Image (cartoon, rainbow, N blue to C red):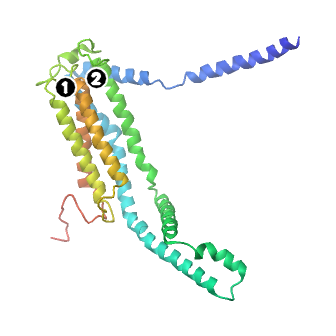
Amino acid sequence: MLLRRSTERILPNRISFLASTTQARKFSLDHNAIITTFTHSFQSIHEVTHLPWWALIPITTFALRSAWTLPLALIQRQRIQRQSELKPIVSAMGPVLRMNLAKKAQEAKHMQEQPTTSPSVVATQSPLANMTYEQILLLSAKEVRKRQKQLFQKHGVQIWKNFMLPAAQIPLWIIMSLTMRDLSGWSSWDNIHNKPLDPSLSTEGILWFQDLTVADSLHVFPVILGVVSLCNVEWTFKTLEMARLTQRLKFRPTLTDAVANFSRLSIVFMMAISVHAPAALTLYWLSSQFYSLVQNVVLDSKFPISYTPKKRFSRETSDDE
């Protein structure tokens, strides 16, 4: 009897839990559905516009980048300009904080040497009086970072907001790459057994890449992709190097150098994949990299970082006339 009653109490709770779990799963995000939606959208645009695939892929890439990532890139560039205007203030805090901290340490040490100082005051001032130069540097650096965070937050240009553009751009790049892979039917390294989702990709190429479902036999696309990607990486990190307030020390790599080297290695990896990838996918990668390069050049010309004395583009001002 007790077992029956406990079972009657447990079963409704179990059923309600399964029902809520099933209902929650209905709202889960399926990445396959997203890829399928993009694939069908591409095919619909192709049927409506009657554009060949060799033209439709770059045009769609430019349109998506212009509508999705370009506004975020403009907002981020304006934010970086404001951060650059505030960085001289942050840079000036370091020497002042180190000097004040060293002065307090010297005063505490001098107070300990006085015979009239009480033991309680000596014990209180002992950590400050025995502070080393390395401790002063560490404490002042922590204080500078704290004040920089407060200053950036006051002006609404927090550092974490600089990750909004990559957070929007990387998923778009992945989704478009998977869409091009599905359209061209690239399921294995053997192009003979791969069957494209849209047969028109096999005939709507141009020049030396008439078939967009197979890899570029002349390996022209991988070379162009590598050159454009390398130009984009070098341009971007040259801009970051020009934005430095202090002179760079030789033979001392920074985090920016590590990211730049990783980006260069990723270009080699992408070139190796593009040798075997279908031309449709490589064409998308090339269009996306070319758009990024043009976008960075235009942003550096129209919205340069104001505080740095080094300019990529020499522009005559009205005062010089």
Looking at marks 2 and 1 on the same chain, the residue that comes earlier in the sequence is marked by 2
Q: Which residue is mark 1?
A: 54
Please identify the quarter of the rendering in which residue 184 is found: top left
Which image quarter is the N terminus in?
top right
Q: Mark 2 is on which residue type? A: Ile
* Label of residue 152 in the image: none
- Frontmost residue, 192 versus 294: 192
Q: Residues within 10 Å of mark 2 (few under 14, many from 20)?
A: few
In the shown orientation, is residue 286 left or right of residue 104?
left
Q: Residue furthest left?
A: 207
In the shown orientation, is residue 321 left or right of residue 302?
left
Can I make out residue 317 in this image? yes
- In the rendered image, residue 156, in percent from the top left (x then y), is placed at 46, 56
In the shown orientation, is residue 94 left or right of residue 20?
left
Q: Residues within 10 Å of mark 1 (few under 14, many from 20)?
A: many
Can I make out residue 62 in this image? no
Q: Residue at x 31, y 34 (%)?
A: 64
Q: Residue at x 26, y 11 (%)?
A: 193
Regarding mark 2 in the picture, which secondary structure is present there? helix
How many discs mark residues in the rendered view? 2
Q: Mark 1 is on which residue type? A: Trp
- Frontmost residue, 1 versus 82: 1
* Label of residue 45 in the image: 2
- In the rendered image, residue 24, in percent from the top left (x then y), is placed at 59, 24
